Amino acid sequence: MKSNLTKIAIAAAFAASMALAQTQAPTAPAPHNHMRARMQHGRQMMMQQLNLSDAQKAQAKAIFQKAHQDAAPVREQLKQTRMDLRAAVKADDTARIQTLTAQEGTLIGKAANIRSAAMADFYKTLTPDQRTKLDSLHKAHQQKMQSHKG
């Protein structure tokens, strides 16, 4: 069960970043552009390896665009909460820090819920062979990330 949740969480992270990359064009050079480009390349490779049909591609795009739109207010709240948290840290306002960190955790949970629900919807569009391939890709990615850590 925990293994399945891990797989879904990893898949959700891929999916969310795929949705972000498909619906947002960078307006100015940002320090994360290199990372964004690498993630987008990884997503494109994953989608090619899954060999999605045109209908599946359209479904995936719709699913992840909706998730991106649903998550927009959460992202904005999270951005504001983090700015407020930085101010509270600078002011050494421990009560406010505690409140804001709890709020941040709730917002991160909401974002994770949106990503996970989108990934579950995407996963339902896959054939059994594609699901097996996706699981294999996630496992390989997980192993690669572990090897980078240690």
Image (tube, helix red, strand yellow):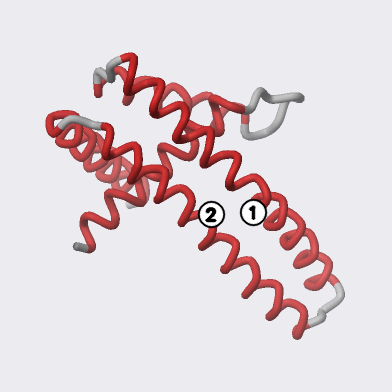
- Please tell me which residue lies in front, 105 or 118: 118
Vertical placement of 35 versus 72: above or below? above
Q: Kindly state the secondary structure of the residue where label 2 is placed.
A: helix
| Rendering coords of residue 19 (x, y %) | 51, 32
Query: Residue type at mark 1?
Result: Val
Around disc 1, counting alpha carbons within 10 Å, would you say few (fewer than 14), some (14 to 19), or many (20 or more)? some
Task: Give the label on residue 65, or none.
Answer: none
Q: Kindly state the secondary structure of the residue where label 1 is placed.
A: helix
The reply, left or right, for residue 32 in relation to residue 90 is: left
| Rendering coords of residue 53 (x, y %) | 28, 16
Residue ID for mark 2: 111
| Rendering coords of residue 145 (x, y %) | 34, 44
Q: CA distance from mark 2 to mark 1?
A: 7 Å
The reply, left or right, for residue 93 in relation to residue 117 is: right
Task: Give the label on residue 74, or none.
Answer: 1
* Residue under the image location 73 percent in, 62 percent down: 81
* Residue under the image location 75 percent in, 67 percent down: 85
- Please tell me which residue lies in front, 128 or 103: 128
Vertical placement of 16 versus 93: above or below? above
State yes or no: discs 2 and 1 in contact (Cβ < 8 Å).
yes
* Residue under the image location 76 percent in, 85 percent down: 95
Query: Residue type at mark 2?
Result: Ala
